[in-house]
Amino acid sequence: MSRSSLLKFALIAICSPLLTSNAISSTYQLPSQPLQNVVEQTKNVSTRLSQDKQWLAVLTPRSHLTIENLASNERKLAGLRVSTESLTPSRIKYTYLSIELVNLHGAAAANINVPLRKGMQVASVSFSPNSRYLSYIGLNKNSADLYIYDIEKNQTTKLNPSRLNATLGLKYIWSNDSQGIFTNLALTTNIEPKTQLIFSPNISQTSGKKAPRRTYQDLLQNAQDEAEFSALTTSQLSFINLDGNVSAIGQPAINISYSLSPDDKYLLVKRVNPPFSYMVKYYDFAQSVELFSSDGTKLKNLASLESSEYRAPGSDSVRKGPRMIHWRADKPSTLAFVQALDKGDSRLKVAYRDQLLQLNAPFNQQPTPLTKTPWRIRSIQWAEQNTAVITERQSDKKQMRVSLLDTTEKSNQQLSLWYQKAIRDTYKDPGRLYRQPAKVNGQQLGRVVKQHNNAFLHYGLGASPQGLKPFLKALPISKNTALVNKSQTLWSSPNEQLESIKYIVNLKPLTVIISRQTADTPPQLVMVNTESGQERNLYENKQNLNAYKGMTRQLVNYTRKDGLPLSGILYLPAGYKKSDGRLPVLMWAYPREYKNAEVASQVNYSANQYQNISTKGPVPFVANGYAIFDKVAMPIVGEGNEKPNDSFRDQLVANASAAIDTLVDMGVADRERIAIGGHSYGAFMVANLLAHSDLFAAGIARSGAYNRSLTPFGFQHEKRNYWEAPSLYQQISPFTHADKIDEPLLLMHGEMDSNSGTYPMQSARLFKAIRGLGGQARLVTFPYESHSYKAKESIMHMLWEQESWLEQHLKQPTLGKSDSAFGQPGLNEAQVTFH
């Protein structure tokens, strides 16, 4: 019997920790009603703004998937998870159930509910460049189809004559004149592309070249996988005119990406080429970059890129050859790209790492160099008046900087620094630059950074020691240099509520769409004329989580024993007073690495921020009477030549000890009833804390990795491989110290975890080690789930497991190590697997 068939029957055998006998359950479990309400709450909407600023599309997201949805047929190939029936990703992150068009310059009666087919979910919603049409991909069991809604005529049309091939993503692009759409079409009408069975031995061989890649999952493994990957992903790139006529762009291929020149004359296409790799995901396969005219004629090959499996190690190492090939948004048809000057190897000491070049139509001359950079270029934005905004990173030092480049002058110009900061330094973050479509001689081009009164506008959250203070600022620009740190504030959030800019609608008078929230009011969308003060409410989010009304929240600042400032957010149940006595506490954290102690102590908090209670975090359990200490700072600092992970364990324990001491000194926490929880790298933290301290009564670890010898070519931000630092890998692995985990540990993991390094085997091996050593643990694995859990049944059961675990180990008297974790002598573990 298939696994999906079994789901229709009794599925699970669970030894319930809340029952006094070994009970057998045949269904997923439900947590208490307040936690169920958190799962059922309305999700936040998404929005799109039309280019003419006339319409705001408000998209209502889909609720949780069901386990039946996740159990549908899928194929795992080259890092993809594909529905072979619909030729789409099998796990689409964002889909929507309804679309409302809000008329920003008309009465509320002028709003439009876009008609959708009954039961259809939509994705990839976009306005056409001329703002007349709203396009989206409609999803059903057997296909993905492209629809356009004509706002003027109130008419919906299915555009594609044959179904899309969206295996590499739900992608399409409008022509800049809004006369049609480029997308990938399937080669066959068959529900599933057919491939011939291939029987052959599976052989791998080294070539003598180093290939230090991380541990990925869902990779190709044999010739059959290669054939299926090729059959599923090969498509015909096409232009579909609004009247339905189709023009093919070149021959069928595995089209990984495509982009149109601003003047609609040329198409840049990146394609995957064999031989395919068994070590990396599809986007790191060998590729060709090809140039076509918009009528489909191939003009030339621009580049051939080798597989990234041989890329040098290090965060700043890149694939050899040209990269970031793209169209300049401020020019009709000019290509720009970056070339590594260090062969892509960030370990080499060179004066310059990268060079930015450009190539003008008709693309038959040598590229023109624009500038060289000593750090690795990470992104490029194009601005008005021939200006480039270039972001560089130096990951070893955890630094980034953003500079301006005047491209009207001769080649290899010097950059003008706007700002430099630590990558994680939120206090110095200037936010996003305001961009608008460019117009040259009446022709609309791409989106560029807009100048207003000889200044660039930028907006962000405004993190500071005093809290969040979102802003809109103007950065004055001179001919050759930016006035560093001389931005002028045009607007800022008021003190009594938290407001942040989502869109700039008009520059004169300055009109913006903001998200407004308070500690008691969910985020609302409001359009504000900042000069007159006139406002219009666009959308209200109604939440009704009565069990959490009256809970208190405060930012708690404290210091580690070495003087490092730390913080966390403390939630207390409604009506709680210190006279009520000390509470059991659930702490939740995620370690982060820093090269700067000052940056490590920063906080991102506002007393005016509405608490959006997520099922992923610990806050739901405040309804059960726990004190919750969330976002507990767990910085791992390595200043100067020190590597953060060299003192990982000691710093973890110091962080946790400082947090606990603070809560105890406040009179809130019972030191004997504190649990620690975390997800992914946070789960790794939990197991380490239980192994190397006696601070906690229990732990909850979800989707973690616990044996670092199974991730030998680095993990998180650790760049040294196992053979360069074997003692570190051993010391930092809680699996190595499983004999010291003498507190109860709840382990949970998705059976189809696709995240790098966090194989489900990691949780299974740690569980078996604890069981074999006589410790207390419980392992729960969720079928069809990946790194984060998506099915409603899984999320409900996850909350029930955590609720039960906390009830047993924090609210009940602590059991002796020889006693049962489940109420019976000798029964010190339970493995819960959904079959």
Image (cartoon, rainbow, N blue to C red):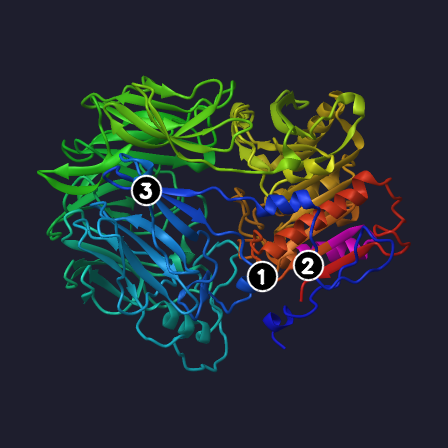
Frontmost residue, 279 versus 20: 20
Magenta residues, dominant SS class: helix
Q: Are marks 3 and 2 in contact (CB under 8 Å)?
A: no
Image coordinates of residue 360 in percent, x first then y, are 13, 46
Q: Which mark is residue 67?
A: 1
Image coordinates of residue 166 in percent, x first then y, are 36, 62
Q: From which residue to which does the magenta span run?
A: 763-778
Q: Which mark is residue 111?
A: 3
Q: Image quadrant of residue 663? A: top right
Image coordinates of residue 692 in percent, x first then y, are 74, 39
Query: Mark 1 belongs to which amino acid?
Result: Ile
Q: Tell me which label, 3 or 2, sits earlier in the chain.
A: 2
> In what element is the residue under mark 2?
loop
Q: Tell me which label, 1 or 2, sits earlier in the chain.
A: 2
Distance in Å between CA atoms under marks 1 and 2: 10 Å
The residue sitting at 43% across, 53% down in the picture is 97
> In what element is the residue under mark 3?
loop
- Does the image show residue 728? no
Per the image, the residue denoted by label 2 is 28
Q: Are marks 1 and 2 in contact (CB under 8 Å)?
A: yes
Image coordinates of residue 39 in percent, x first then y, are 60, 47
- Whether residue 735 sits left or right of residue 24 in the image: it is left
